[in-house]
Amino acid sequence: MIRQALHKMPDRLRLPLLTAIYGVVGGLAAVAFMESIHWLFDGGWGWLTALSPARFLIASFLVITVSSLAAGSRSSRPPTGTIWA
C-alpha cells in the first residue's frame, strides 16, 4: 500500500519526503539507542561502586563489553531491504 503510493508520487516530492522520513526514523533510533545505553550505565555504575575493587573491575568490564557489543551489532547490521523492492 505504501509502496504503491510512493511509486505514484512524482520524483520531485518523493525524494524529499523519503529523506525526511529516513531522517526522523534514524534520529529516533539513535535517541532510543543512546537512552538504552544511558540506562545501562546509569543502572550499572551505582551498584558497581559498592563492590570490592576486584569485583568492580570485572563488573565494569562486563558493562563496557555489553554496551560495546550492542553498539557494534547495531552499526554492522546489513540492510534487510528497501522500500523499492
Image: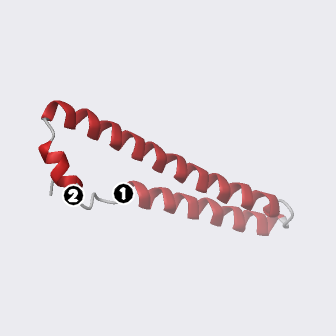
Vertical relation: 52 (above or below) 5:
below
Q: Measured from the top left, where is residue 33 in percent x and y? A: 53, 53
Say which residue appears at 20% left-offset and 33% top-offset: 13
Report the amino acid beneath label 1: Ser
Sort mark 1 into few (<14), some (14-19) or many (20+) by Cα contacts within 10 Å: few
Image position of 68 (left or right of 77): right
Report the amino acid beneath label 2: Met
Q: Residue under circle 1?
A: 76
Quarter location, residue 39 = bottom right
Say which residue appears at 29% left-offset and 59% top-offset: 78
Sort mark 2 into few (<14), some (14-19) or many (20+) by Cα contacts within 10 Å: few
Choose between 21 and 76: the one closer to the eye.
21
Q: Measured from the top left, where is residue 26 in percent x and y? A: 41, 45
Tell me the quadrant of the picture where the N terminus can be found: bottom left
Image position of 31 (left or right of 15): right
On the question of residue 3 being in view, the answer is yes
